[in-house]
């Protein structure tokens, strides 16, 4: 009776089962996997919600692509990042996950393939599976810094490939796309007749400048491309549920994509009126809202770097984002290490395989927790090595 695409194995893995037991026992855990800024003492001021009470929000005037003033605000935000895009090329969604769902509907038929980076965020398998789309991976390689393995990308393409997903900076590696990498992706996409989906949600959180980086693929001209962002990361407001995509590429292809996306969006009309009316004001306070988050992740990264030096753990180079990766001696599996840390030391971390690292042994930690808890959690990790 129920669909095969929702026939997931929902059995908790060993780490999830142990975490549930520890919480039920009332253990005081240091959670180094927390990536919700509203749960780590970074809650924005309450007056930020005032624009959501605009009386104009009492009227329902659905716009499939999103309200013009909200789309104009998003276009202005892309301009800040160096991309000139028309507000007519912007589509609003309730989340970047929804944006992916729309794009997989637009680009793929059942059984088609999207390419995603490895390692990367594990949600792609679910998002693609819900659209009856398959996922294949291309490698990110580490040689002192992370880079896109262009040979791996070219080898992953086949006749069913419809999209290449880029994440910049990547979650969890924190690596930004470089200009030469995007040139190679553009060439592969053009040859395969595939679109590029560029997830740029962490784009404002860089730990330093680098002239090699590409700020955004919005405004791309050679191949069909979709640049994604949202309030969740750009303003640290995941609870307000507003995201967006900018559609660009050859004029005829981009226009057809927008026209079809408008039909998809009109079918759901999922973006709430109040947050659209507030979008310009919220984005106008972006710098103010980002500052505490940027300060927190920068401080915790510096602390992690200092603490890991001279130990058995190696902090892999991270350029931006909210996470960091530690490489550990592979004396035991990373899952066993994560279980040991939780069982005996009350520290929650993600083993690398959660993010599809191709070999052992890595731990992924969030840089968002309060500094005192973060430092104590890191010290407990380093003491067990």
Image (cartoon, rainbow, N blue to C red):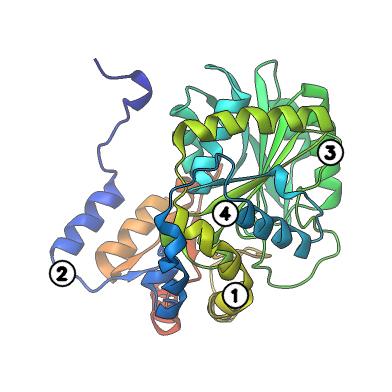
In the rendered image, residue 219, in percent from the top left (x then y), is placed at: 81, 47
Q: Residues within 10 Å of mark 4 (few under 14, many from 20)?
A: many
Which disc, if any, is residue 184? 3
In the rendered image, residue 204, in percent from the top left (x then y), is placed at: 66, 66
2 or 4: tag closer to the N-terminus: 2
Which disc, if any, is residue 26? 2
Q: Residue at x 77, y 49 (%)?
A: 86
Kindly report the distance in space between the C-alpha atoms of the residues bearing marks 1 and 3.
Answer: 36 Å
Is residue 56 positioned above or below 246 on the image? below
- In the rendered image, is residue 212 in sight? yes
Q: Please, what secondary structure does the residue beneath circle 3 have?
A: helix
Kindly report the distance in space between the C-alpha atoms of the residues bearing marks 1 and 4.
Answer: 25 Å
Which disc, if any, is residue 171? 4
Q: Please, what secondary structure does the residue beneath circle 2 have?
A: loop
Quarter of the rendering containing residue 203: bottom right
1 or 4: tag closer to the N-terminus: 4
Q: Which of 211/264 is in front?
A: 264
Kindly report the distance in space between the C-alpha atoms of the residues bearing marks 2 and 4.
Answer: 30 Å
Kindly report the distance in space between the C-alpha atoms of the residues bearing marks 2 and 3.
Answer: 51 Å
Q: Which residue is mark 1?
A: 285
Q: Which of 165/80 is in front?
A: 80
């Amino acid at each position: 009776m129920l669909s095969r695409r929702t026939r997931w194995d929902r059995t908790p893995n060993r780490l999830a089962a142990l975490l549930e037991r520890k919480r039920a026992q009332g253990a005081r855990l240091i959670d180094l996997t927390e990536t919700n800024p509203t749960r780590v003492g970074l809650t924005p001021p309450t007056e930020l919600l005032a624009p959501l009470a605009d009386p104009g929000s009492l009227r329902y005037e659905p716009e499939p692509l999103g309200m013009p003033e909200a789309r104009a605000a998003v276009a202005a935000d892309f301009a800040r990042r160096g991309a000139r895009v028309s507000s007519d090329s912007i589509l609003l969604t309730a989340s970047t996950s929804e944006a992916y769902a729309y794009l997989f509907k637009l680009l793929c038929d059942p059984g088609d393939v999207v390419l995603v980076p490895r390692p990367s965020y594990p949600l792609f398998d679910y998002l693609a599976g819900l659209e009856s789309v398959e996922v294949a991976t291309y490698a990110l390689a580490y040689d002192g810094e992370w880079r896109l393995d262009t040979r791996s990308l070219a080898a992953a393409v086949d006749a069913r490939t419809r999209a290449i997903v880029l994440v910049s900076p990547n979650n969890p590696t924190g690596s930004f796309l470089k200009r030469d990498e995007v040139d190679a992706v553009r060439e592969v996409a053009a040859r395969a007749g595939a679109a590029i989906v560029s997830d740029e949600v962490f784009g404002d959180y860089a730990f330093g400048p680098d002239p090699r980086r590409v700020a955004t693929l919005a405004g791309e001209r050679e191949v069909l491309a979709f640049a994604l962002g949202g309030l969740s990361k750009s303003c640290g407001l995941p609870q307000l549920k507003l995201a967006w995509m900018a559609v660009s590429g050859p004029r005829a292809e981009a226009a057809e994509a927008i026209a079809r996306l408008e039909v998809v969006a009109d079918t759901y009309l999922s973006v709430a009126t109040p947050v659209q009316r507030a979008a310009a004001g919220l984005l106008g306070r972006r710098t103010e809202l980002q500052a505490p988050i940027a300060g927190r992740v920068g401080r915790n990264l510096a602390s992690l770097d200092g603490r890991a030096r001279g130990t058995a753990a190696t902090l892999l180079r991270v350029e931006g984002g909210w996470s960091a990766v530690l490489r550990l001696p592979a004396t035991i599996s990373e899952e066993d290490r994560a279980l040991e840390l939780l069982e005996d030391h009350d520290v929650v971390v993600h083993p690398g395989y959660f993010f599809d690292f191709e070999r052992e042994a890595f731990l992924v930690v969030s840089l968002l927790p309060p500094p005192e808890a973060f430092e104590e959690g890191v010290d407990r990790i380093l003491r067990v090595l």
